[in-house]
Amino acid sequence: MTAMQLIHGWNPDDPGYWRDQGARIARRNLWVSVPALVLAFAVWMVWSAVVVELPAAGFRYSSNQLFWLAALPALSGATLRIVYAFAVAAFGGRRFNTLATASLLLPALGIGFAVQQPDTPYEWMVALAMLCGLGGGNFASSMAHLSFFYPVPRKGSALGLNAGLGNLGVALAQLVVPAVVGVGLFGAIGGAPQSGASGQPIWLQNAGFVWVPFIALAALGCWLGMDDLADQRGSFAEQALIFRRRHTWLLCLLYLGTFGSVIGLSAGAPLLAATLFPSAAVLQIAWIGPLAAGLLRPLGGWLADRRGGARVTLWTFAALIIGVAGLLASLPRAGSAGSWPGAAGAFGLLFAAAGIGTGSSLRMIPIAYIGARQRAAGPLPAARARAASDGNREGAAALGFAGAVGAYGGFFVPKAWGTSITLTGGPEAALQAFAAFYLVCLAVTWWWFARRFAPLPC
């Protein structure tokens, strides 16, 4: 069986099938998906690092304009995820993920050329920030594709691993961009340097160009290494049934609270920290938070497979509330410079809790759909098998759609901080709103999914 075949009769929940051939095929698709998703996240969040460097390169943008550039990739990426969530079943996972990965060349090359001229119109920068949303859309197609390949007991671990390692692209962008802009990485073909804040040369174009060869290789890998599944196919109308399910909207709310926090913090925390603590070496450690969230995301999926997704998610929302309280206590105030170590620790707790919660809430989604379908189907084995197949297809679409809703956190979090600072002089109002939202998510998780005799235990 070659990677370029359309596989018929895929049945990973059959132990014999899984042992003889399913596990090998699933692992290959997973390990082809991971590097492509890493690059997608890196391109999606590259502006979180670039905006901090723009003033040094001579771009005269206001703080509010910079927060907009940091937030817009998440807005466009979240919207694209709605389309990408359904595209895999409509067009096939292999061909669509190949196209989606190759599309990342557009923003990578565009940024590389645009940042070489400080007189580049702000509107063009906005367009490039929106194009970076292509990377955000890739998550939905990648997760929808992989959700078909693994049996129910392994879904949480596999999806958590793909999403968690993919999420490391955020940390990679925030680690790589400050490193590569200080060197003439591509020589004469990369363009002339700009003058930095202290007069030293910087090559801000490297923030875009550095990803180009890796994107090309990853797209080729998707084409050669992924498979299409005949059972994966479904029309948009069939998948649109998820919008009539109450649990779709409940699970989307929870994923907005977990993944939305990860991507929102990743997009806005470096700029917020640099604004509030200008003497702190923010960029040197900004990548640690996204790295921790990405590494802990598979742990959340693993814990969810063993302890229950709802139970793990419940505790992560409690930890997020504590993290917000710690950040509020560490902020600068009149007569006080605040505590940068305290703020850094609070950011660390927020990233860690949200990372674990992203893995656990992600696992809840396919389990909820399969369970709901099987409870409605009754005890007959044939009916339950059909229900599991239908639930798997709905769950795959819901994974992508929840990913779209969750990604809007990457817009709302930094924009809320920017608006709060503009209107009140500080981010306190936004943080208080976040704490209230986490409390609502905690209550929803307990009532619908975690308590004894919950309507949708998962």
Image: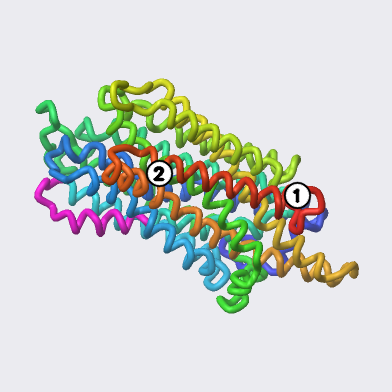
Q: Amino acid at mark 1?
A: Pro
> Does 61 appear above or below 455?
above
Q: Is residue 373 above or below residue 222?
A: below
What amino acid is found at the position of numbered circle 2 in the picture? Ala
Q: Which mark is residue 430?
A: 2
Residue range highlighted in magenta: 116-133
Q: Are marks 2 and 1 in contact (CB under 8 Å)?
A: no
Find residue 130 and report its horizontal and vertical position in percent.
31, 58
In-front residue for pair 49/320: 320
Q: How many marks?
A: 2
Residue 102 shows in the view: no
Q: Quadrant of the N terminus?
A: bottom right
Label 2, residues with CA under 10 Å away: few <14, some 14-19, many ≥20: some
**Image coords of residue 426 (percent x, y):** 32, 37
Q: Quadrant of residue 186?
A: top left
Please state the horizontal and vertical placement of residue 311, each as a whole percent of the image.
71, 43
Q: Which residue is mark 1?
A: 153
The dominant secondary structure in magenta is: helix
Q: Is residue 309 left or right of residue 317?
A: right
